[in-house]
Image: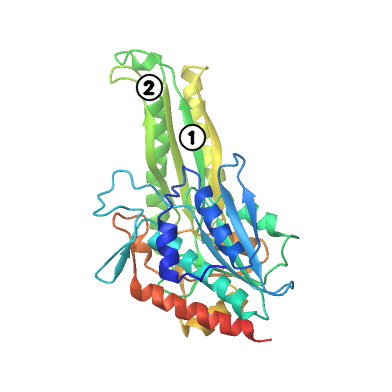
Amino acid sequence: MSDPLSPRDLLEKLVSFPTVSRDSNLALVDWVEGYLNDHGIACQRDYDPTGQKASLYAHVGPEIEGGVVLSGHTDVVPVDGQDWHSDPFTLIEKDGKLHGRGACDMKGFDALAIWAAVEAKRRGVARPLQLCLSRDEEIGCTGAPPMIEHMQGRVPKAALAIIGEPTEWGVVTGHKGGGAYDIHVHGHEVHSSMPHTGVSAIMEGARLIDWANRTNEENRAKAAADSPYDPAWTTLHVGIIHGGTAHNITAKDCTFILSARCIPEEPVEHWLDRMREEILRVEAGMKAVRPDTGITFEERWNVPGLAAETQGEAEALVRHLTGENGSSVVSYGTEAGQFQAAGYSAVVCGPGNIAQAHQPDEYLTVDQLQKGEAFMTRLLDTLMET
């Protein structure tokens, strides 16, 4: 058995794996599983359909229900086009900051959770600790639901889950849900001097994007003044778009992702339905000109929001560990709502500031990592109690 690594050493190792969502994460999963196995912790995997990515989970402690899940994701966003001042996949300390892709979002928490799992095994906890490291969170939280399903019946069900997204160790008890469609607009090419005889996929796609802009303004105008969310309304968004052949040809194809981040009062399904209705309305206009045109669309993600719980066990535990009395909600999504939907009490609490997530020269402060080690130590003390 090798000597246990510190959270800092574990973070350095995790950052060294370039687990960008478009690529495999198996090198990281292999290393983590080997490290945990070396310390007497058995792991299980849930693979994606390609077999090139996997989520990893482990159970430490007695084979009983009622344990605590520490949940993080293994994937990171790309660094393409970003102005980094160091190798993104080499952890660099400068001025009290640990720079590296994923250091904040969210390999810092992953490192702390792995450290805690090994410590739990060494101590011999009375209440179980479970480690969950998912795949594909950054492309729509698509890895957590099959992992959670895979866990059922294979490990005793835990009572609560702490999702360690960046909150600077504040207690987040609610967040927006979200949904999205992959959209492919199929046009009909003609010379751009005769646009009325064809159908431009880009111009028709723009109708959907204009609808999204107008809907955002409508939602903003009716937003509740006392909402804890910022922004206090459901937002629609298109972040990237592709299409067209040449400047003088009506576009045959246009593809983009249309997404929504939904306030709790407006379910994700409602907005997926609204988007679908608008897609079909635009498509009808296209087909009136050229019947061979149309729009194909497929649900890309559907992530439930996290609802504040009445006397939630996860919230109570995290308040005990942090000493925090306040709570907050956030507009970004996490896997917490997915754990909650599966019957776990859930809360979001972890190291770092979300403003650093996805940024060039992303960092986690040394202080936040040290606070995390203290948090995990207090958690282990609590799990030692019968």
Residue kind at label 2, given as amino acid type: Ala
Residue kind at label 1, given as amino acid type: Ile
Q: Earlier in the sequence, mark 2 or mark 1?
A: 1
- The residue beneath circle 1 is 183
Name which quarter of the figure residue 70 lies in: bottom right
Residue at 38 percent of width and 31 percent of height = 242
Residue 339 locus on image (x, y percent) = 61, 62
Name which quarter of the figure residue 57 lies in: bottom right
Residue 37 locus on image (x, y percent) = 61, 62
The residue nearer to you, when weighing 81 against 59, is: 59
Secondary structure beneath dot 1 equals strand
For residue 349, side relative to residue 65 (left or right): left
Secondary structure beneath dot 2 equals loop
Give the quadrant of the C terminus.
bottom right
The residue nearer to you, when weighing 139 against 273, is: 139
For residue 160, side relative to residue 305 (left or right): right
Which of the numbered marks, if any, corresponds to residue 227?
A: none
Q: CA distance from mark 2 to mark 1?
A: 15 Å
- The residue beneath circle 2 is 251
Residue at 41 percent of width and 46 percent of height = 237
Q: Residues within 10 Å of mark 1 (few under 14, many from 20)?
A: many
Seen as rendered, the residue at the extreme front is: 1
